[in-house]
Amino acid sequence: MTETRDEELTSPLDGFRFTAARAKPAGERKGGVVVIQEIFGVSPHIREICGFYADHGYEAIAPSLYDRIEKNFRVTEPNEAGFAKGIKGATTTPPDQVVADLQASIDALGAGPIYVTGFCYGGAMSWLAAARCTGLKAASGFYGGMIPNLLDQAPKIPIILHFGKEDAHIPMAAVDKIRAAAPDVPIYLYDAGHGFCRRNSTDFHAASCDLALQRTLDFFAANR
């Protein structure tokens, strides 16, 4: 799998320089993808996803959205303290700041078409990017539990969503709320729990992850 290399990007909001992992395809470039982190930061899982897209012809960038809290922010241990650290990052990072950092990532990818995808916290931020960022063609959000709180911000581009039927953190009532507010958005349900695409998660489910990633690739290819 293609490896990532770190670089720095500049936020158009406050001029802050933040870290981003970048992976470039070896062959023909089909476009670019912004990969948005979980609460754990730009983890090995997120770098792996960047490599996945690079292997499929897309230049990928994953911005470190909590760098103002801690440079190269990352939760290395999935214990109570680690989760608390990640949740603090999510709850204290202003949406306007996230949008600006994502816009810098989109702009850094240059020539289009450019897409966005994300996982957990990043799944919700994919919805936010689809509503507020410019230069995007389509979005794909994975198990974004915060999306019901963002329904007043409608996506301006095509978006698909992925949720696990057995997700202990996102009840089906939340998914139904999204479906009612955005009936034209395709929502895919999988026989899996939360984090079904993260290999070190107890909920990792290879078949569901492979299907969701393939649906995302197909969706991006259909929106060029």
Image (spheres, rainbow, N blue to C red):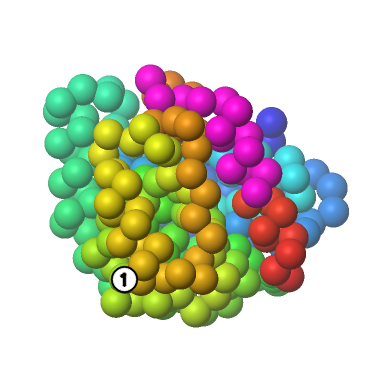
From the viewer's perspective, is 37 left or right of 61? left
For image coordinates 36% across by 62% down, the residue present is: 178
Q: Would you say residue 72 is visible in this rendering?
A: no
Q: Mark 1: few, some, or many residues within 10 Å (few <14, many ≥20)?
A: some
* Residue 60 seen from this side: yes
* Residue pictured at 21% horizontal, 22% vertical: 79
User: Residue at (31%, 61%) from the top-left corner?
Assistant: 177
Q: Position of residue 184 (x, y in %)?
A: 51, 71
Is residue 168 rendered magenta in the image? no
Q: Secondary structure at mark 1?
A: loop
Q: Main secondary structure of the magenta part?
A: helix
Q: Quadrant of residue 169?
A: top left
Residue 90 placement, left or right of 10: left
Quadrant including the N terminus: top right
Q: Amino acid at mark 1?
A: Leu
Residue 114 drawn at (x, y percent): 63, 66
Q: Quadrant of residue 195?
A: top left
Relative horizontal placement of residue 131, taking residue 223 as reference (left or right): left
Q: Where is 113 relative to 81, above or below?
A: below
Relative to 212, 98 lies left or right: left
Magenta includes 206? yes
Position of residue 193 measured from the top left corner of the image (x, y, whole percent): 39, 31
Q: Which residues are magenta?
A: 202-215
Image coords of residue 89 (percent x, y): 21, 48
Classify the position of the C terminus by image quarter.
bottom right
Report which residue position mark 1 lands on: 151
